[in-house]
Image (cartoon, rainbow, N blue to C red):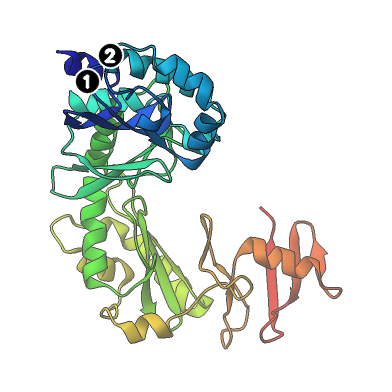
Amino acid sequence: MEHVEFFRSFPLLVPESLEPLKADGYMEGVRVHVAVDAGPTGGTYCIDAVKSTPEIEQFLNSKREELDGRLRQCTSALSFARELEYILAAAPVDAPERTSRFYSRIIDECDGSVGWDCIVSFDEKSQLAEAQLEDESGRRHSVYINFATETFSSDVEEGSVPMEGTRLAQYMAAVGERCRELRGCWELLDEVDATLCVLQPAQPRRRDLWRRVAVTDLATALVETAPGRRWPRIVVYGPASVAGPLNARARAARAQWSARRPARDNIEAVLGCALPEPSADRQRDTRLECGICFAFMAGAEPADQLCGSDACAQPFHRSCLLQWLATKEDTRQSFATLFGKCPYCGGHVSVTRV
């Protein structure tokens, strides 16, 4: 019965054996391994029965005489563990060696409402656990339990939620509800990934509700979706002579989008042109990143400011082009618009602050 009371009193210790009693886990947020006899014999109640981090063992050995005197007065494994708990509470330990105050709460939830089956990994060094849940379509999603920052997060959306005031079961239920909201978006994007030449993101995450796809050698399209939207937002980027007519067509024909048609057929119908097949060569050759920072997206900002020469048509981010032109002596300004030269061909470029 003492074993039962022992592990009930210290739920973060996991039994390795009962005779002699050996357990591994955490006490006072410190990783320990304890090995003692169940009875008060043989002088087992001493600091030699405790293994821990080098810092903790150094602390225990520095006070060996005092601590052994206290521990040898214990009459059971339970009283030994309680005395050790008091000692460890006073140990000078760096923050990363201590576990979160929410550790035992998460364990209780895994023992009860959440279950252990959903936990797929735990990194002791980073104090990060990963749980998985499966949505109604069979997609698996990761939920991250970060004991170092005491937050929950997931691969479904940006940001994190503090553990304070939120239980793991509540957070996983909220992620499940978000998955239901995004189901239609993911079905569309899965079709886009499978049938079109997707340039970005290179490794899409479930939270990425946009794709940049190849249209021609000089134009790409941003396909962006959101929950509740009847059709995706489609914007073509490239030289004005190419992108202008395609964007005008997209605005006029977007109502032609039909839920009964495949995503590829819908996008081709809206743009009024055939789209290239998925191809590694096409992905390599269609490079329309910002000519200054060499990325297509700068946060939520696409590279949609173009050199005025159709022969060049180099795209830039608005913010990058503003900074570039602001450093050039021959840049002219009229109200909020800057006029200057393309850093590639020397042709006319202009950009307006918004």
User: Residue at 33% across / 23% down in the picture?
Assistant: 43
Disc marking residue 257: none
Q: Quadrant of residue 93?
A: top right
Location of residue 208 in the rendering, given as x and y in whole percent from the top left corner: 37, 54
Q: Which residue is mark 2?
A: 76
- Per the image, label 1 sits on a secondary structure element best described as loop
Would you place residue 78 above or below residue 257 in this image?
Answer: above
Location of residue 269 in the rendering, given as x and y in whole percent from the top left corner: 25, 69
Would you place residue 283 above or below residue 149 in this image?
Answer: below
Would you place residue 155 above or below residue 17 in this image?
Answer: below
User: Residue at 49% across / 34% down in the picture?
Assistant: 56
Question: Considering depth in this image, is 320 or 60 the residue closer to the camera?
Answer: 60
Instruction: Give the number of marks.
Output: 2
User: Residue at 47% across / 32% down in the picture?
Assistant: 98
Farthest residue toward the right? 329
Q: Which residue is mark 1?
A: 38
